[in-house]
Amino acid sequence: MLSKNQLGFLYMFISVCAFSVMDLIVKWSEHYPLGQVLFFRGFFGVILYFFIMPKERINNFYLTKRAGLHFLRCLFGLIALIAIFIALRNLPLATVVSISFAAPIFTTIFSIFFLSEKVGFYRWLAVLIGFIGIIVIIEPGFDSLNVYYIFPIIFCLGLSYVAIAIRQLSTTEPVWLISLFFSAAITLASLFTIPLGWVVPSIEDLFLLSMIGFLGGFANLWLGQSFKLSEVSLVSPLKYLALVFGIIFGYLIWDEIPTIKTLVGALLVVFSSLIILKREIYYKEKIPSTTRHE
């Protein structure tokens, strides 16, 4: 029988694997319109959450007293999701994953304004190290005027506000409702892209596209269970396995070999987020999950 910490470790590992495979499918789906891929992420996520919501909430699942905050969470989450999808289609997989690790850096800054938290010397040092890491990674992008390097940063900014909003919402709202509203928002927004042209997928592609929704939905659930069951300090470092998966998938499928600058920058970003994690645990604050929430 596994202990709670061991179960939490397992849930985090499965969550990271699910997100990594989802990223892989999103990158593969570049021959499908972005709006259509968003539809599959949202629609099948909605289906998933309807199956896990409590039976007594089926008739009034939509009731909430915090509609405004839900709207902001969905808006910034949608911006982040679109940005990461664009980045995955146009940049090496390992590069996108590396920059996405910078989300806790922006969350630290946002927490000052939205949660009135005090940020000490060590977390400011972590922010500085993280920004240096980002500059090291994207410097080739500035040289070649590759505008796509801005999209992982947009993702981090959007995800950072999402982490703050979820932290506020979770005091009164169930996790499944927060995720359900987000999946519904993705689905609704994607429908406006139909006039731009959608492609009828084959049976095989239909399965893969639907897996984007199911993997994203399950990954968020497993992530939540991991933090619920185990110590955050034990399971959080596992999220950096996504970089290993990104390097492996990128090399095997697209012949992408990460540059030395990408690896050095990634190490700096990972180091900075680990400092932030350690300081959060030291002060025994509730840590908003900035791993994904897509």
Image: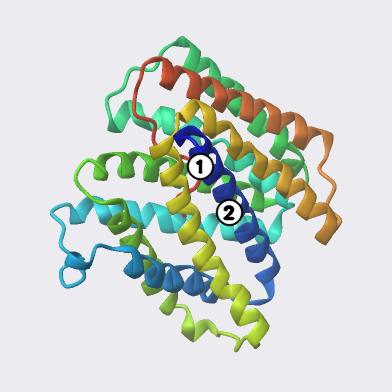
Q: What type is the residue that disc 1 sits on?
A: Thr
Query: So how many labels did they put on this image?
Result: 2
- 87 left or right of 255 in image: left
Q: Secondary structure at mark 1?
A: loop
Q: Position of residue 179 (x, y in %)?
A: 35, 57
Residue 291 is labelled as 1
Quadrant position of residue 45: bottom left
Q: CA distance from mark 1 to mark 2?
A: 10 Å
* Colouring scheme applied when the structure was drawn: rainbow
Q: Which of 150/214 is in front?
A: 214
User: Is 292 drawn above or below residue 270 in the view shown?
Assistant: below
**Of the residues shown, which amino acid type is indicated by label 2?**
Phe
Residue 78, position in %: x, y? 42, 59
At a point 19% along the width and 45% down the height, the residue shown is: 172
Q: Residue furthest toward the top?
A: 121
**Which of the two residues, 62 or 85, is positioned nearer the viewer here?**
62
Q: What x and y, as percent, mark residue 46?
A: 38, 69
Residue occupying image coordinates x 47% and y 78% = 193
The answer to whether any part of residue 138 appears in the image is yes
Residue 109's quadrant in the figure?
top left
**Is 116 above or below relative to 249?**
above
User: Which residue does the numbered mark 2 point to in the structure image?
Assistant: 19
Mark 2, other Cα within 10 Å: few <14 / some 14–19 / many ≥20 = many
Dot 1 and dot 2 residues touching (CB under 8 Å)? yes
Residue placed most toward the observer, 224 or 106: 224
Q: Position of residue 207 (x, y in %)?
A: 60, 78
* 126 versus 141 height, above or below: above
Element marked by disc 2: helix
Neighbourhood count class around disc 1 (C-alpha, 10 Å): few under 14, some 14–19, many 20 upward:
many
Q: Is residue 145 visible?
A: no
Q: Residue furthest front?
A: 1
